[in-house]
Image: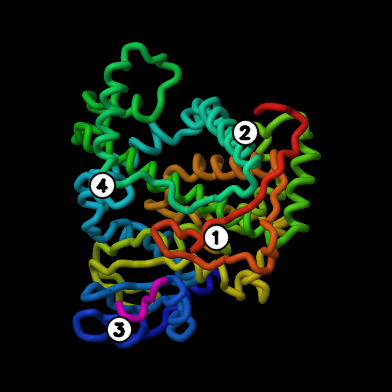
Amino acid sequence: MMSSFLGNNIVHSKHALPPGPRGLPLIGNLHILSDLPHQALHKLSQKYGPIMHIRLGQVPTIVVSSPEAAELFLKAHDLVFASRPTVQAEKFIGYGFRGLAFSPYGAYWRSMRKLCTLELFTNTKIEMFRPMRKEEVSGLVDIVKSAADAGEVGLRRDLRPVVKAFNKMFDAILEEHTQEARKQNANFRDFIDVMLSLKDSNYLQDIKLNKDHIKSIIMDVLAAGMDTSVNVINWALPELLRHPKLMKRVQEELREVIGMDRMVEEIDLTKLNFLNLVIKETMRLHPVAPLLLPHESIEDITINGYFIPKKSQVFINIWTIGRDPKVWSENAEEFNPDRFMDVDMDIHGRDFQLIPFGSGRRGCPGMQLGLTVVQLILAQLLHCFNWELPNGISSCDLDMKEKFALAMSRESPLLAIPTYRLNITNS
């Protein structure tokens, strides 16, 4: 399917832009985006096709809405679209574009990517912090157990502190780590210790790490890892509450694989086949980044017969791709984890039908850590507790409306009643 699309070179004039709606003076097509731009762009793509042109103000924008087209932009021509458009908010929140997520493509970005992939998110580092994750998740279980005595537990969408407090908090954290550096066990260091140890080295050659670089990476890790993980769980749990038979299957798998006399360990996660299908289906139907972080073209290029000007921003609408009936059949709107049964579909960027972490050069470097956190927390919540909706709310009445943001959340927080179900008295 992919190869036939890639080879289908439609004949257009040399500078024919992709099709798209006519824009208004100055604002272009901004007026049609609504509060849920991924859904508005989905409707437009049904009319104009999987490679569509719009204008956001005066910025030429390409919207990609099929796996075949996504492969063109993120694989076949990945280098051309490896940059990011300038986002003014990131200039202040991200310490002047010193982070990884929004930095333009170039030597600086490559150096920061090297730091993240070789020093922060390696399998060795992820394994090193396993005891820390276990401690934190055990604490979460204790909190839910205590809250269960009061009845309903609310899972809310926004756990971020106020942005203005970040800088003060980061300075305090860096100072604490600097003071404790000599006392640290070299075999058990966290991300900040690793970066501080490289601050005065030539590890990045032409870039000397300073505190702003380190704080920007911390910000990226928080922004990319915290809200996204929370929101995957905030979509998975209500879907299981809406489908009691699926909830029962997940919990039966946990009972059979883990037993009822201990909590889930990370070493168990690969054995929880149906739980992992549930997570895949959640990421398909409720991608936390429905429009992947925008890419920007670094030169003029013609793709599939369409002219894409330099400095065009590109949105990959994975919300639309996840609902494409040509890919997922006519039941694409249904929550059905069994669609992945006996299907070898990678979610790390290889298969463009499902790319929750992006793909190519700008794919998320922390995807494996993020996936591990989601698997572990969701497994604990489902293994340690039975969940019910409050009186008066039926599964078919559960509000599943979306609230668009960098990490898409539920419009309303989930209220559910947990009941502890393990045969152990403490976590």
**Structural crowding at the residue carrying mark 1, measured as other residues with C-alpha within 10 Å and reported as few (<14), some (14–19) or many (≥20):** many
Magenta stretch holds residue 33: yes
Q: Nearer the viewer, mark 3 or mark 4?
A: 4
Inspect the image, locate mark 3, and give the three-letter code of the amino acid beneath it: Ala
Residue bearing the label numbered 2? 266
Inspect the image, locate mark 4, and give the three-letter code of the amino acid beneath it: Gly
Classify mark 1: helix, strand or loop.
loop
Magenta stretch holds residue 298: no
Please state the total of marks drawn on the protein image.
Answer: 4
Q: Residue at x 62, y 49 (%)?
A: 152
Instruction: Identify the image quadrant of the N terminus.
Output: bottom right
Which comes before the other along the chain, label 1 or label 3?
Answer: 3
Which comes before the other along the chain, label 2 or label 4?
Answer: 4
- Closest to the observer, 122 or 134: 134
Q: Residue at x 48, y 45 (%)?
A: 367
**Structural crowding at the residue carrying mark 2, measured as other residues with C-alpha within 10 Å and reported as few (<14), some (14–19) or many (≥20):** some
What distance separates the C-alpha of mark 2 from that of mark 4? 32 Å
